[in-house]
Amino acid sequence: MDVNRNRIPAHIETIHLIAVCGTGMGALAGMLKDLGYRVTGSDQGIYPPMSDFLAGKGIPAAPGFSRDHLAHRPDLVVVGNAVTRENPEALALMEMGLSYCSMPQAVNHFVVRDRQVLMVVGTHGKTTTASILAWMLHCAGLDPSFFIGGIVRDFQSNYRLGGGPFIVIEGDEYDTAFFDKGPKFLHYDPAVAVLTGVEFDHADIYKDLSAVKQAFGRLIHRMNPTSTLIPYDGDPNAAELASACGCRVLPYGHRPDSPWRLGGIESAPPWTRFEVLRDGRRFGAFNTRLMGRHNLENILACMAAGDAVGIPKAAMAAALESFQGPRRRQEVRGVKRGVTVIDDFAHHPTAVRETLRAVRSFYPEGRLVAVFEPRTNTSMRRVFQAVYPQVFEDADQVLIRKPSRLDKVPPEERLSSETLVADLKRRGMDARHFDDTDAVIRFLVETAESGDTILIMSNGGFDNIHERLLAAL
């Protein structure tokens, strides 16, 4: 790639996005259209809901990748991080001498501008935490912008262009593009950064935990001295990284010396009631429909960030009581014959464990059935083979679907779902293995009982298992 063409020209009217149907790229396309640019895109898989979203915005999305899609010579080409250097459009844009940039470069240039960035980073909880913070700003009348990696049900969108001084960004540690292998979050200069914790993930791009910590360390070391870092105090990696930060640091969690701490907690479905302490003194008592301690920690981080930028306590309380949560995060998809079906994005072992604990706390009666599809580049690898058997303790039954994309992983590195089930059985658990989604649905239809809660965990669509199961029950 000609690095001299990796720039955003001063005068732009037309913008083309390669791999426009990704969640972030689709949101960016919508933002650019809202800003008045003529936007086009292309992708291999163009299907609902993203195809409907783009069509509704009047954004043409061409199927497949072809140099013909650049025949109109757009002023700028945004290259998604799923695009390889062999992509026909990537090759064509270089041959044609077109200007190009990555998604975070575009977000920073076109959307952030003079807004103050409130960024949420970490291995877990980014989408939920960023969504809560955006909703708090909205309820405080601060008209926020946001760019988040999931649909925020309160806004029915994963992006917003507001007129206020703040933009909430979910900062991704995944690489930026094939021509920029650094994390996406390095493209932003946060006034406030929440660090929810640092664990090993993304085994396809990070060698080990040390490499992951190094990526987060690069972000923290470059933060402006006038900025504020809000790290989770229960994660030793986050605490270690925060100790080297040159800006203001406000830890949150449970340690007696942390400025923001959780007090008493009461689970009273559909509410969780909890107390917050600031600098050792009672800040207030609050209600939320979110379940589980990990979500209370996410809320606590938002309170620390919100307080740092002047959100009144009353607005925080109102936001928490009305907040619906992002889609695919402990989202109840339906109840049929007394069986509750819940959808969650959990895939990392820690997220699986905490999600099961949270759901169990709200559904203590009846069986909790965990249905898990290892689908990410990390969860399909052996890296967590010995860890996964330890995280399903809160489930009464565990159903493991064989990963559907194992061909993307070298044979010697693949997770064995059969071994996982065998290990779960050795721990005395009722665990079963399935080769496909149809078999999972058939089993659940035959065995589900009134009062059961079925928690389905996958970072993908899982063959639309939620709606199909509800229809078949």
Image (tube, grey):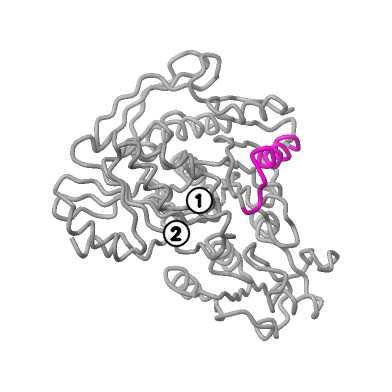
Helix, strand or loop status at disc 1: loop
Viewer-nearest residue: 416 or 319:
416
Question: x%, y% of residue 38?
Answer: 62, 75
Query: Can you tell which quarter of the image residue 68 is in?
Result: bottom right
Determine which residue is flagged by label 1.
379
Residue 313, placed above or below residue 189: above
Residue 224 relative to residue 470: left or right: right
Image quadrant where one finds the C terminus: bottom left
Q: Main secondary structure of the magenta part?
A: helix
Q: Give the alpha-carbon distance from disc 2 to disc 1, as whole Å.
A: 9 Å
Residue 144, placed above or below residue 461: above
Residue 374 relative to residue 267: left or right: right
User: What is the three-letter code of the residue carrying label 2?
Assistant: Pro
**CB within 8 Å, label 2 to label 1:** yes
Residue 231, placed above or below residue 258: below
Confirm whether residue 52 shows in the render: yes
User: What is the three-letter code of the residue carrying label 1?
Assistant: Ser
